[in-house]
Image: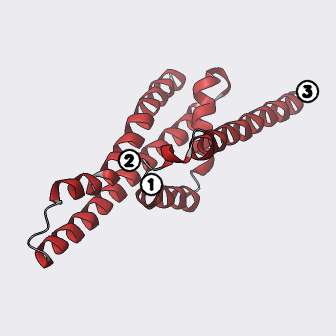
């Protein structure tokens, strides 16, 4: 009976993860195509990919990808998780936050070096302020990722201390 219950709960959580992934992909599809192509003009996909791809690869390489996905499930189903499972998910969220900040900083540095190089080659280059705002986009994306994930990380840490006692 216990094995059947564990199998059922595992099936339910995997179904929830599939639904979550489909929901996220659906929202992205609607934003890109449903609202109108003009809404997508405000997203710098190169900077976003520059940050998200390393985060995804590090999650895959370290094996924390499952913990990252399950972090959202643990916040919903608080009673059905152990302290170790919560700790792994919190570590996965922290890893994504740090990785996004590092790669956002690298993207900002690369953009600023290119901007300064362009300014040196063309001293009459007048659009410096506009290009600085474009150079700040990778930092903005990493900030958005951290603003979304850090409260979840702190909530998981609170849940971990509660379950560890």
Q: Is residue 32 above or below residue 46?
A: above
The quadrant in which the N terminus is found is top right
Specify whether 153 is left or right of 4: left
Query: Which residue shows up at 27% across the image and 64% down it?
Result: 111
x, y percentage for residue 50?
A: 43, 61
Specify which label sits upstream in the sequence, 3 or 1.
3
Which numbered tag is attached to residue 141?
A: 2
Q: Is residue 68 above or below residue 112?
A: above
Query: Which residue shows up at 42% across the image and 47% down it?
Result: 42
Specify which label sits upstream in the sequence, 1 or 2.
1
Dot 2 crowding, Cα within 10 Å, few <14, some 14–19, many 20+: many
Residue marked by disc 3 = 1
Spatial CA span between label 1 and label 2:
7 Å
Q: Which element type, helix, strand or loop, lies under badge 3? A: loop
Q: Nearer the viewer, residue 85 or 12?
A: 12
Spatial CA span between label 2 and label 3:
47 Å
Query: Which residue shows up at 11% across the image and 75% down it?
Result: 120
Q: Is residue 99 above or below residue 33?
A: below
Which numbered tag is attached to residue 21?
A: none
Specify which label sits upstream in the sequence, 2 or 3.
3
Q: Which element type, helix, strand or loop, lies under badge 1? A: helix
Q: Nearer the viewer, residue 9 or 137?
A: 137
x, y percentage for residue 69?
A: 61, 42
Residue marked by disc 1 = 48
Dot 1 crowding, Cα within 10 Å, few <14, some 14–19, many 20+: some
Q: Are marks 1 and 2 in contact (CB under 8 Å)?
A: yes
Q: Nearer the viewer, mark 2 or mark 3?
A: 2
Residue 44 found in image quarter: bottom left
Q: Which element type, helix, strand or loop, lies under badge 2? A: helix
Specify whether 4 is left or right of 53: right
x, y percentage for residue 94?
A: 43, 44
């Amino acid at each position: 009976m216990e094995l059947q219950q564990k199998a059922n709960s595992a099936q339910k959580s995997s179904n929830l993860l599939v639904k979550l992934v489909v929901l996220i992909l659906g929202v992205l599809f609607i934003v890109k195509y449903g609202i109108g192509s003009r809404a997508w003009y405000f997203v710098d996909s190169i900077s976003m990919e520059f940050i998200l791809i390393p985060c995804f690869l590090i999650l895959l390489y370290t094996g924390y990808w499952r913990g990252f996905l399950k972090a959202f499930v643990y916040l919903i189903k608080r009673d059905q998780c152990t302290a170790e499972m919560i700790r792994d998910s919190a570590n996965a969220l922290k890893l994504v936050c740090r990785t996004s900040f590092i790669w956002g900083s690298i993207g900002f540095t690369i953009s600023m070096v290119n901007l300064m190089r362009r300014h040196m080659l063309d001293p009459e280059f007048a659009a410096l302020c506009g290009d600085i705002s474009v150079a700040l986009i990778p930092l903005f994306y990493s900030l958005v990722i951290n603003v979304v994930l850090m409260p979840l990380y702190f909530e998981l840490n609170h849940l971990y201390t509660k379950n560890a006692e």
